[in-house]
Amino acid sequence: MPSFDSRNFKIGPCAVMYKGNFIGETKNSSVLNFRATYRDTKCSYAYDQPLEKRILSKKLTLSTEVLAIDNGLSLLFDEDDKFTLNGLGGKQSQNSGELLLIPLNKLDNVGYRIPKALLLQDVSCSFNEEEEHTLRLQFEAFFDENKVMLERFTVDESQRVKFATNNVVDPVWFERAITSWLADKFGMTVDTDIFRGGIPVNADGCGIALTGKKESNSSVSQRYEFCISCLGDTRDSVMKKIHEFATEFPVYGETITLENGEPVYVKAILQKSMDFIQQMGNDGKIKNYGELILEVII
């Protein structure tokens, strides 16, 4: 019975390198399109049924969607960071360069190289609201002096791209840091009118708790869910406080410091939901409760 190495079934993004520069990490699917044009050889006695095919031309294109849009857009702009009509009517193959696809999986040593790839100016940029901006690029391959359009190569470790991302943070330290940051932002005092982990029994006020983490296969972001809760005697006071918190979000590009002094860059803090409908007992009294759910992306 023949056997097949399961490592040949591969999953995961690639780093896109163009002209020696990192363009971005691929998102979703990148597609290599192989196209050829043919001429059929026919004859009348076969009633024009094709008897042979001859290849007249070959075409290779790559369509890829990448994260980190600034590097890719810079390829379209001039030295003044402008997209202009310069270059109309000019030859484009002279602008081609080497394109590499290098897997982020360190156990995958197979990369792909287009020696002469031309970035086509058919580009779409998506400014997404709740996830990383993406850039869809298209490249066309030209053959080099050896008539090579695409080749596989063994990736050297020096060619790998290392992402300067936040490491997985300690959830306890992260919850404490977010609590302190929120208290400073709203002029509150930790353990007096805002509490880490939720509101204690027999106390009114606000609480902040890390309630979960959204699992992701992306190497560029981690997503945590936090709940800001508020407990008070009246529904009006609870609604007012929750709305006061909500007016400050979304927040982008904050740096929050952990207890050990390590800075954590927060890409975004987004509102996810708000709830005012709950009442609960607290020390024998009926209290009004509300909450604001946030997604913290690092």
Image (cartoon, rainbow, N blue to C red):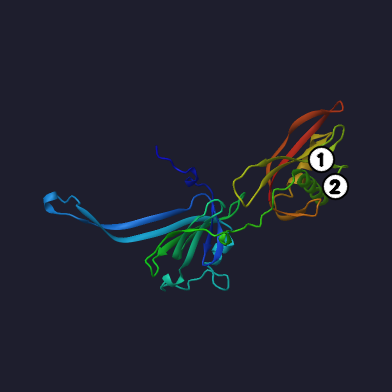
Image side of residue 36 versus residue 179, left or right: left
Q: Residues within 10 Å of mark 1 (few under 14, many from 20)?
A: many
Identity of the residue drawn at 52% across and 68% down: 83
Give the Cα separation between the discs numbered 2 and 1: 10 Å
Identity of the residue drawn at 58% across and 55% down: 133
Callout 2 amino acid: Met
Using the image as rendered, state which of residue 132 and residue 50 is in the foreground: 50
Q: Secondary structure at mark 1?
A: strand
Q: Secondary structure at mark 2?
A: loop
Image side of residue 70 versus residue 31, left or right: right
- The residue indicated by pointer 1 is 206
Using the image as rendered, state which of residue 104 and residue 117 is in the foreground: 104
Answer above or below: position of 194 versus 80: above
Q: Quadrant of residue 43?
A: bottom left
Using the image as rendered, state which of residue 255 and residue 116 is in the foreground: 116
Callout 1 amino acid: Cys
Can residue 92 be seen here? no
